[in-house]
Every structure is written in structure tokens, then in C-alpha cells.
Amino acid sequence: MTTHVVAPVIAIEPNDAWDRSFARSRLSIPENGKVVYVQLGAGRINSIENILKQVLEALYAYPDIHVVLGESMLGERLMFTHDRLRVIRDYPNALYAHGFDAAVQAGGYNSYQEMRMFGVPTLFIPNIETGMDDQVARCKESEKEGWGTVYLPGGESIEDKITELLKMTAIPIPSENGVHSIMDLLDIGST
């Protein structure tokens, strides 16, 4: 058996995402507002409602912050409302990435790789109940690279981690999209 290591695979390239102005227009969010994207997964492996409520309350404490809540296509509809909240149930949500100033995400592969490539400062709340996906280890890498921070139960409060997140700056980590290498390995050519 031959093993090949490829770069991370992502759904869309940064150049394929909507520009900041268009993404915000689609979301009906002011161009000059600060926008935080929140997506904590589908809630099928772990319960996300309580932590999601804490995150939203911590963000609403900042009067200039608008929140874009990403509903998972696999999960139930979320029943949160607020005048500075927009809910999207779209795919891929990375189309909006240039419109985000920061994010609060679960630590899944796709979320992690997208925020990393787009350079969105991110607070990760990894799912520690997954059986085969070490989200904590993955998310800790964002701290080493300087573009992310990790919340774990028993550590700092959500409010403190949100404050830390909002002070972070964007650091895009350029990377080749591994899908092109996979296509070459399969001899089906890159597009």
C-alpha cells in the first residue's frame, strides 16, 4: 500500500468566495459593523444549545457586533432571535467568509481548514465527544499558528475567550487545496 500526503481539502478556494461587500449585502449587515460567524455543529454527537446560548449572550454584550449563525444542514432548526442576528442554512457557508471578522466554531475538519485558509480569527469550541476525531489537538494548532484560540470546559470563561477572540488579527495561512493533488493521483486531472 502506498501512502500519499496531500494539503488540506476544502470545498472552495478563497478567490471563489464572495467579496466582503457582497457577502454582507446578502446578509443585510452594515459594511462597517463587526461580524462574528458562529457554527457549533449539528448537535447530533453533543448538545450545543447551552454553549451556543452562552456564546451568543457574550457576543451581544458588544453593541457593535453582528452575529451570523450557521445552521447545520444535518441538524434541527435553531430557535434563536436577536436584532443583530442573521441565520444562514446554506452550503458552503465559506462563500461568506470574506464578510466575517471573527468566528466561533466547533473543531471539525472542514470548519478548521476553511477558517485557517481564509485567515478568520477563530475561537474553537471542540467537540470532545467524537470517537475518532481529535478536535482538541487540531484546534490547539491554531493557537500555535497565532490565528485561533480554544475554549475547553473548566478553563477560562466563554466571556474571557470572546474578549480574547475580538482582539485577534486575521492571519491567512496560504495552502494548496489538496483536492488538486488527489485528482492528479487519481489521474483525472485538475480543473
Image (cartoon, rainbow, N blue to C red):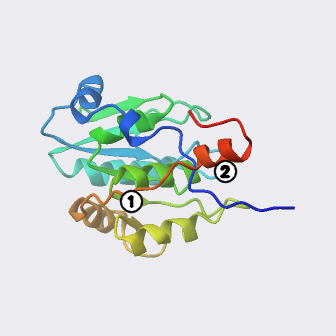
The answer to which of 182 and 187 lies nearer the viewer is 187
The alpha-carbon separation of the residues under discs 2 and 1 comes to 29 Å
**Position of 183 compared to 165: left or right?**
right
Question: Residue 106: x, y in percent?
Answer: 51, 54
Residue 2 horizontal side relative to residue 60, left or right: right
Closest to the observer: 2 or 119? 2
Q: Is residue 172 above or below residue 21?
A: below
Quadrant in the picture for the C terminus: top right
The N terminus sits in image quarter = bottom right
Residue located 39% across and 38% down the image: 69
Q: Position of residue 18 (x, y in %)?
A: 33, 31
Seen at 27% across and 67% down, the residue is: 164
Quarter holding residue 13: top left
Q: Position of residue 183 (x, y in %)?
A: 66, 41
Q: Is 3 left, or right, of 173 in this rendering? A: right
Give the quadrant of residue 165. bottom left
The reply, left or right, for residue 130 in relation to residue 160 is: right
Density class for disc 2 (Cα within 10 Å; few <14, some 14-19, many ≥20) is: few
Tag 1's secondary structure? loop
Neighbor class of circle 1 (other Cα within 10 Å; few <14, some 14-19, many 20+) is some
The secondary element bearing badge 2 is classed as: loop
Q: Which label sits in the foreground, 2 or 1?
A: 1
User: Where is residue 14 drawn, in percent x and y?
Assistant: 39, 42
Q: Which mark is residue 55?
A: none
96 w.r.t. 168: above or below: above
Q: Nearer the viewer, residue 83 or 15?
A: 15
Task: Provide the residue designation for mark 1.
Answer: 173
User: Mark 2 — residue?
Assistant: 45
Q: Earlier in the sequence, mark 2 or mark 1?
A: 2
Q: From the viewer's side, name the closer residue of 87 and 21.
A: 21
Q: Amino acid at mark 2?
A: Ile
Label 1 is placed on what type of residue? Ile
